[in-house]
Image: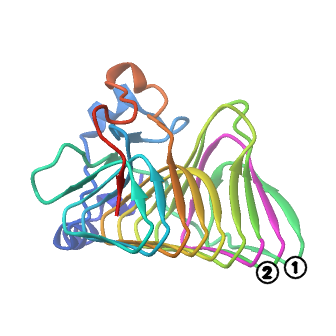
Amino acid sequence: MNNAMNNPSILNNISRKGAGFALMALTTLAAIGSAAHGGIVDTPKGFVLRSNGSMALEGNVHASGAVGALGTVTSGWGTSLDGIETGSVHTWTNPVITSWAAPTSNNVNLAWAETRSLTAGAYGSFTSNSSTTLNLGPGNYTFSIFQLGWSGKVVANTNAGDVYLYVNGGLTTDSATRFETTGPGKLFIVTLGSMNFGYQTNLQAALYSGGAMSFGGDSRLTGLAYAGGNISAGYGATFAFSNVPAPGVSALLAVAGIIGGRRRRRL
């Protein structure tokens, strides 16, 4: 299967940037993941935000869960976090991301207020005008880039399984966008490039970026986020940890809750 994660030049570039994406032998992957179940192995250990760079949080940011960065963590007035770890010695870990299908030339563009449903598979670029809705069922979706317009919404129907959204480039959203699930399963979003979420974006997802990640002011994430680059969050952003180990792997992982013994810290 052709996949950018197996491209040596991209892997070298990720390594130089400190992205921290780990790869496993395909023989091992077959035992823990498949095309139907995606390929993410993660033990977040209660960390809602993890960065292999540094982290900059503006004022009044709240995190129900610890944050960890290889570099520094800076924050503004009124920010509260459930714990901070910085530096090369830490308890948080990098996720393992496996291969996924290469994108195609089948581009998807949604007009103003359009609603469209896609089946799992490989696509080209995704772009949308304002007030659109994209419905996704269980399975793997690959795009070259992903751009969601103002007040756009991605609805992952996870009643029958998890949804994996892979992007070989970057993901950007305008303001007031939403990524939500409608069942007990999870939404996983993985990009080789950066993720940039606009003002008041609301997400129910596990986010994994090979580059930087930014959240606009008053954004809300329920799930977790990992970035190979820096993480930034605007004023009033909130983060609530939700554990999301990959299907088929949870039996192999020591699933941890919020890190015990951490006292809530107000900065």
Specify whether 118 is left or right of 47: right
Q: Quadrant of residue 14?
A: bottom left
Residue extending farthest top: 251
Quarter of the image where the C terminus is located? bottom left
- Tell me where residue 84 appears, x and y as whole percent: 27, 54
Mark 1 burial class by Cα count in 10 Å: few <14, some 14-19, many 20+: some
- Tell me where residue 97 appears, x and y as whole percent: 35, 48
| Residue at 41% in and 25% down | 250
- Tell me where residue 74 appears, x and y as whole percent: 30, 72
Amino acid type of the residue that numbered disc 2 sits on in the rendered structure: Asn
Specify whether 9 is left or right of 187: left
Q: Quadrant of residue 115?
A: bottom right
Q: Quadrant of residue 3?
A: bottom left
Residue sitting nearer the eye, 233 or 263: 263
Residue sitting nearer the eye, 30 or 114: 114
Secondary structure of the residue carrying tag 1 is loop
Answer whether residue 150 is magenta in the image: yes
| Residue at 19% in and 62% down | 70
Q: Give how far apart the Cα atoms at labels 2 and 1 are.
A: 5 Å
Mark 2 burial class by Cα count in 10 Å: few <14, some 14-19, many 20+: some
Q: Which residue is mark 2?
A: 129
- Tell me where residue 191 appears, x and y as whole percent: 45, 63
Answer whether residue 163 is magenta in the image: no
| Residue at 51% in and 55% down | 239
Q: For the residues labelled 2 and 1, say whether their Cβ atoms are less than 8 Å apart.
A: yes
Q: Which residues are magenta?
A: 131-151
Residue sitting nearer the eye, 71 or 141: 71
Secondary structure of the residue carrying tag 2 is loop
Specify whether 90 is left or right of 58: left
Q: Which residue is mark 1?
A: 112
Q: How many marks?
A: 2
Amino acid type of the residue that numbered disc 1 sits on in the rendered structure: Trp
